[in-house]
Image (cartoon, rainbow, N blue to C red):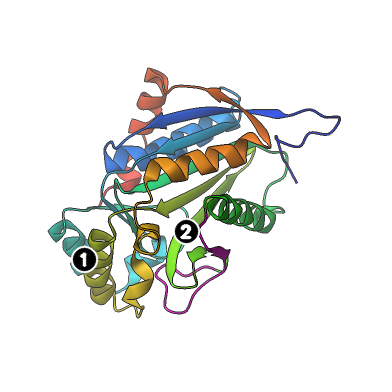
Amino acid sequence: MDRAGDLGGGQRGALSVLRHGPGDALTDLAMARALLDAVRDGRRGPTLRIYRPAPTVAFGARDRFLDGFRPAIEAARAHDFTPALRTLGGRVAAYHPGSLVIDHIEPTTAFLTETQDRFVRFGEMYAAALRDIGIDARMGEIPGEYCPGEHSVNVGGEIKAIGTAQRVVGGAWLFSSSIIVEDPDPIRAVLTDVQAALGLAWEPRTGGSISELHPGLTVETVEDALRAAYSREYDLVPGQLDPADAEAARTYLDAHRL
């Protein structure tokens, strides 16, 4: 498996860390694709993007074919969440400034042969990072969760805490994770109405935040735990977005707009 953090011979790979947000929901999604292009083309090295997202309901491609898709978009707007189309992942997901999104992007010589390995590797890594700060985190789907996936990370078998997805292109991969840490009520409320419009069955108790079971937990504490986990495998180097990134992201805005 491609692992910049485990290159053999004692070498550690470097990850350029980009931090920002909350920003604009569509731009944040478009920026992920722009950065994937930049890593694929060699204009950037391996990159770890960490940001606090704007209130977003990110619909999966399959959601477009459901009869309730348009009402679901309006339901998202009614809760002051921006509806957007994502180009990776499964069903609809929601996140907001009480969440953390991590986009890990690396070049690769493989194409589709290691996707499952990444799901397992990073799911286990993130769950372990949460356990390091006293959270009962486990990898695995829980009954009735929204955007179900076998590599989700849950808390105590009750709340879906982390959803993961990836996009692989010739020459690079992007592994994206959304972590719902604080402020559960807006997430549960918007998902309740959006899921109902789409006609998707789910168990609302699964759609909260980690802080429901661990009061006082903050996004900053979770970010520190995840950065600590990454620093055990990689050299983390501060980076920044530049005007070329912003221009590249603009070319993808329409792909996410609803």
Picture residue at 27% right of the left edge, 55% below the top: 183
Q: Magenta segment, which residues?
A: 134-149
The image quadrant of residue 40 is top right
Q: How many residues crowd around disc 2 within 10 Å: few (fewer than 14), some, or many (20 or more)?
A: many
Picture residue at 18% right of the left edge, 68% below the top: 71
Rendered location of residue 103, percent (x, y): 49, 41
198, above or below 92, in the image: below
Rendered location of residue 90, percent (x, y): 46, 63
Q: How many residues crowd around disc 1 within 10 Å: few (fewer than 14), some, or many (20 or more)?
A: some
Picture residue at 50% right of the left edge, 48% below the top: 176
Q: Secondary structure at mark 1?
A: helix
44, above or below 219, in the image: above
Residue 92 in magenta?
Answer: no
Q: Which residue is mark 2?
A: 163
Q: Is residue 63 left or right of residue 132?
A: left
Which numbered circle lies on residue 70? 1
Q: Residue furthest right?
A: 9
- Single out the mark in the foreground, 2 or 1: 2
Q: Marks 2 and 1: CB-CB under 8 Å? A: no
Q: Residue furthest top?
A: 243
Rendered location of residue 54, percent (x, y): 27, 44
